[in-house]
Image (cartoon, rainbow, N blue to C red):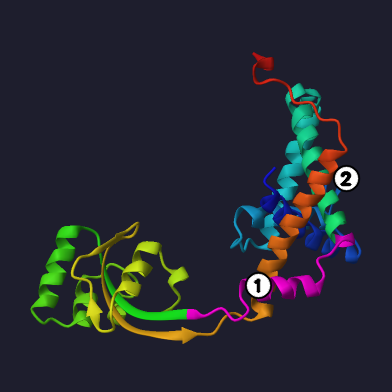
Amino acid sequence: MKVKQAILSAILLAALSSLAFAEEDKTVATVNGHELKQSTLQFYALERRQIDPKSTTPVEKLVDDIVNMQLLKEEAVKMKLHSSDEFKARMSFINLSMLSQVAMINFLDNNPIPEARLRKEYDARIGDMKVTELKASHILVKDEAKAKEVIEKLNKGAKFADLAKEYSTGPTGPKGGDLGWFTPQRMVPEFSQAVLAMKDDEYTKTAVRTQFGFHIILRTGQREGTPPTFEEVKPNITAALEQEHIQKHINELRKSAKIKVAPKNASN
């Protein structure tokens, strides 16, 4: 089981279910006498958000979707598709998945991570951690030949910002390639390592290759930054500790369970 993914789903389901049943479960549409409820709409919206977190589908479109789903469901029942072995197997898995998530919600609700434990974890992970911030500009090009051409112009005295505006394919090109201040963790390793190895006002004499292309980098500064506050990282710490919490609980359940796994060749 991918516990992290399951916990995320469980948390989302918990948040949505409390919203769905905190108020009257109103009817949003009626199809052939069957009432489709607000809770159904909200669970469908959750499903859409899990697939695409940036989804902003209008409510009217979501209602239209579940109306169509109801029509297809009625057709399936008429054709007795719900009696097929495949359907029963799918429903068995859905039941397994949903009940396991509900069990996790229940466990976390009744065994929450204490605030003191969260703060202790924050102190251990971050606490007085020193944060390095770097400032740099870059020129991003698609191939090494173009990168060598740009570096040659820099060597002859051309201004970095002017070349960035002319050659860079990255979004910072119009701004002269300025990336502003950033922590090394924000950038791909190859890029950060190159900047850390440079001195201020120095540019790379050889292009740095990453998954995005070839970078000519100009380092312009380094400073000591401020670690994130407890409140800023609390959701991430909570999620990590809840993952451990659930895994320990599952391990305890396994200890007291009778589990027999079929040999790999049993189905052959």
Q: CA distance from mark 2 to mark 1?
A: 59 Å
Q: Position of residue 34 (x, y in %)?
A: 87, 45
Q: Secondary structure at mark 1?
A: helix
75 in relation to 206, above or below: above
Name the kind of residue labelled 1 in the image.
Ala
Determine whether, in the image, residue 141 is placed left or right of residue 119.
left
Magenta part of the chain: 109-131
Return the disc, 2 or 1, that comes first in the chain's sequence.
2
Determine whether, in the image, residue 20 is placed left or right of residue 124.
right
Of 30 and 1, nearer the camera is 1
Magenta stretch: includes residue 125: yes
Q: Position of residue 201 (x, y in %)?
A: 25, 84
Magenta stretch: includes residue 59: no
Residue that mark 1 sits on:
124
Of 162 and 257, nearer the camera is 257
Classed neighbour count for the residue bearing mark 1: other residues with Cα under 10 Å, few (<14), some (14–19), many (≥20): few
Quadrant where the image shows the N terminus: top right
Determine whether, in the image, residue 138 is placed left or right of residue 79.
left
Of 95 and 7, nearer the camera is 7
| Quarter location, residue 122 | bottom right
71 in relation to 59, above or below: above
Residue that mark 2 sits on:
33
Name the kind of residue labelled 2 in the image.
Gly
